[in-house]
Amino acid sequence: MLPQSAALEFASADNLRGKDETGSERRGNPATVVQHGRGETREIGRNPLKAERSGRDGDRSLTARQITASQVFVLDKHGNPLMPCSPARTRKLLKSKRARIHRLAPFVIRLVDRDAEHSEVAGVEIGIDPGSKATGISVFRASSDTRVGLVAIELQHRGQYIHKKLQQRSGYRRGRRSRNLRYRSPRFNNRTKSKGWSAPSLQHRVDSAMSLVTRLRKWTPVTGIHQELVRFDMQKMQNSEISGVEYRQGTLQGYEVREYLLEKWQRKCAYCEAADVPLNIDHIQPKIKGGSNRVSNLTLACIPCNESKDNLDLKAWLASRFAPTEAEAIAKRVLALSKAPLKDAAAVNSTRWALYHALQATGLPVRVGTGGQTKWNRSRTRLAKSHILDAICVGQVNGVVSYPSSVIIAKAAGRRTYSRTVSDKSGFPRLTRPRIKCVQGFQTGDLVRAVVPSGKKMGTHVGRVAVRRSCSFNITTKGKTLQGISHRHCTLLQRGDGWGYEQRKEVGPVARVGLSLPTAKAGGFSSHTHSR
């Protein structure tokens, strides 16, 4: 009897072409999975050449599956958060009129026929990686051993801008006092700071991070928060016996020290300042001449400098390798920086605890981890260095299945300035700002679309608007600012909320040549372990 084809399946009358709810076509009977040739029958299989090629590039295909599209926030008809969905699913919901656009930046949809009380919501978790200039926030779905990234947000801080403005305000204030009240005693001598006070440039990091966490709780069903609480565990670096075998003989202690040194020496050789090369941990004072494994005696050196220095004294080796003036400058710089603390790390460490207490006040379970543990998780999953990927690797992680391909860049832009007078560089008033906020229905900070029909600025531009009384607006798009756009060409898309949003692509997985996972020995750290 000749081989027969698979039996046909009945399709529902209201389901076109035999598709199920998810839109995927139904397959044939699995019992008849055969492929007929010339007088022979064999099971369906992959092309042997393709299978062999795929076996050779197994790591590459595994890496390609780790990058997925960023998910979209979903609300029910009452505004309660549901699980995020994919962009393709979002397009289908909007096309079928089952959903409406709730926000554009970030993009949020609201279902018109779904209630959270009658829906199955698994819940998501938030990972936070605080930084000095930017904080990474990742929304992911966590199971018992893996994490699936859904949304990635990079929060850019304005600490340096706030510090600059405070100095400028202080100069104006002292200028007024010296001009009008030169004999009056200083007012700030008898003032004291309240307990728990932080500088405005530091408190801004906590407030902006908490603002984003509050917004994410409105858009997603958050069930837990993970935070990188301690960037560098100084006690465990100095005394490895305070927390068990993992820090005495394991690899986590090595990662704490290496991450600290990479941050301190800016991922460059301390001697020749070579960058983007494999780096070794080097003892400034050799151990054979009384040097120790303390962090203040450790630095980073490229392979040629490390091999050339060997067990020589620092100044003697520099004198034999560099010019006399250059050798003296390098020795002075290395010895001064070796005992200097990290200014940015100290500032961030002070705000981490304030952020931790603020997160605990939300009532959600907050789990913490260290920077060395985060780097260990990121290296095991072969992910690149970024705040977003650090946020998804915070705490106890066994694997990362996927992460978003795009990142939302959020920056607190403010709603306007309270100052009504603009001063020049000497502190004298230059002009007066208007008291009105709304011009032709637009306010500074609104998201608009401008369609310019002609001229040098012809085209469609989407961005934040800055209004003027002359009705000639400025529109800030990605990377540039367009001036002199008439209000007649502008259409309001979303009211300003004090934030600015952009998008960028996330960096892909990394497989560095010459980078090996470090191992910490019981008696100290190997001086020939590559780090980046």
Image: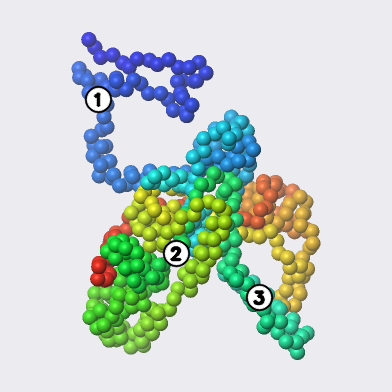
Q: Position of residue 302 (x, y in %)?
A: 30, 71
Residue position for label 1: 43
Q: Quadrant of residue 232?
A: bottom left
Q: CA distance from mark 3 to mark 1?
A: 77 Å
Task: Name the secondary structure under disc 3.
Answer: helix
Amino acid type at mark 1: Glu
Q: State whether residue 529 appears in this view.
A: yes
Which residue appears at 33% of the width and 78% of the height? 297
Q: Residues within 10 Å of mark 1 (few under 14, many from 20)?
A: few
When the figure is inspected, residue 190 is found, relative to residue 461, above or below; the finding is below
Q: State whether residue 93 appears in this view.
A: no
Residue position for label 2: 230
Residue position for label 3: 168
Amino acid type at mark 2: Val
- Position of 506 with respect to 81 (left or right) is left
- Position of 250 with respect to 490 (left or right) is left
Q: Position of residue 395 (x, y in %)?
A: 41, 55
Q: Residues within 10 Å of mark 3 (few under 14, many from 20)?
A: few
Choose between 529 and 324: the one closer to the eye.
529
